[in-house]
Amino acid sequence: APEKGKYLWTRTTITYSDGTNSVAYSTSYFATDAPHIKVQYGASSSGPWYDSYAEGRSWMRTSTDGGTTWSAAIKVVGEDGSDGAYTEYQFAKNTSVTTAPTSGWQDAPPSLATNEYLWMRTRVIDSSGTAGSWSAAVRISGSQGPKGDKGDKGADGLSVAEVLIYRRASSTPAKPSGGTFNFSTQTLSPPSGWSASIPSGTDPVWVSVGIASTQGSSGTANVTWSDPVKAFADGKDGKDGVDGQHGQSVNMIFRRSTSQPETPAASSGTPTGWYDDAGSATGSGLLYSSVGTRTSPTSNWVWQKPILVEGQKGADGADAKLLYLAADSEVFKVAKDGTVTPSSITLTAHLQNVSGTVTWSTEPTVTLTGSGNSRTLSATNMGSNEKVKITASLGGLTDTVTIVKVVDGADGKDGKDGKDGKGVTSSVVTYQLHTSGTTAPTGTWSSNIPTLQKGQYLWTRTVTTYSD
């Protein structure tokens, strides 16, 4: 049986399905009879002293011999404290593990992509709302590791529940028996005469610790109970304490606007046109937020200047520049009798969103005639070359056209009638604009170069007709 002045220790050993154990301890103390304590209160450490407490009597002394001797006086009511400061946190991310971000700081941690790292900085806001300097930023996330392999499904473990039941009684009650615990609903059904919460009454409260276990996460199991121990007995009501100081509250509100909103006026709640969460902010424009503080639940919120929490739309990019080189033919045709058609080929450099005179070059070197952005290659200047590559360049833009020479084959020796030789009778170049740069257009082709348009591609089609 419990003895006064000694501790009662309880050890609970739980064995799991994987063979491991855990041990938990709890203790209860059975107090010895204590002497009667007399208490007096005074406005200072030297008195005068009174048997009852009243406002202003902030010092106390005690006696255990009926008032013959007294303890040293102690102060039991402190002075009102001042409003406290709080710490503000901000977060940002970048791809460096050594250099902190210089922009993008926000109140909540952003989501991280691969090879991105999270940084944090802090500053102190004192009780007057004055903000200190930001601390040096520190990186608080490491490199993201590879995704691990999915593990095999494990067997159902042993579910264990430790529960408490209570009973009021003037003397030690018998050890409880019975009762169940439902793991599916996490519901305790206590034994008769006991309850899962502390019952009302004036007798001392007794407590018993129970252990229930089952394989898996559902089902109902019986409970094994410990001997009851006295938890506590009701004491006399204490005197009301002095009201504490109200702490400073912080709130954040949101709204969408096409321009910088005005700072909201002080208000008891959320100002008109603002919202408590970003997802509820309706309307057009970018998302702004304002932080508010108040010193007590009855005072108004004081709002800060709204700040932009969404990025601005970027400026339009510069117009695309284009240099396109066009030739009225890409083939010199040489007949059996040596006649060459056409006698010359003219090339023209077309420019879009760029101005100036192009630079001409050939490979191999041949003579081009003409000036400005137009050049002509004669059949004579083509010489014996089978092909000539002609390039026009301006401001980093280039385009190239290759001119080829096609020669009809010589007549064969008389003999069996052979098939007619295959020669080129015509070569026609046509043009068409299209929105795709990879798929050829299917519309109407024109022998004239159309007016170039922003965002479209100029396609060239060469149709060569042979003598067969």
Image (tube, rainbow, N blue to C red):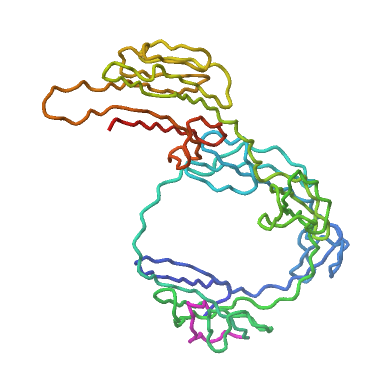
The percent position of residue 74, horizontal first and vertical second, equals: 77, 58
Residue 417 in the figure: left or right of residue 390: left
Pick the front one: 349 or 92: 349
Please count the marks in the image. Answer: 0
Which residue is at 42% across, 66% downward? 22
Magenta span of residues: 170-186
Quarter location, residue 222: bottom left
Which residue shows up at 64% across the image and 82% down it?
A: 199
In the displayed orientation, state which residue is furthest to the right: 48
State which quarter of the image contains the C terminus.
top left
Q: Is residue 178 above or below residue 87?
A: below
Q: Which quadrant would residue 314 be assigned to in this image?
A: top right
Q: Is residue 19 magenta?
A: no
Prevalent SS, magenta region: loop
Horizontal arrangement in the rendering, residue 86 relative to residue 294 (left or right): left
Closer to us: 239 or 129: 129
Rendered location of residue 77, percent (x, y): 80, 59
In front of the other: 167 or 409: 409
Q: Nearer the viewer, residue 355 or 34?
A: 355
Up/down of 191 relative to 324, above or below: below
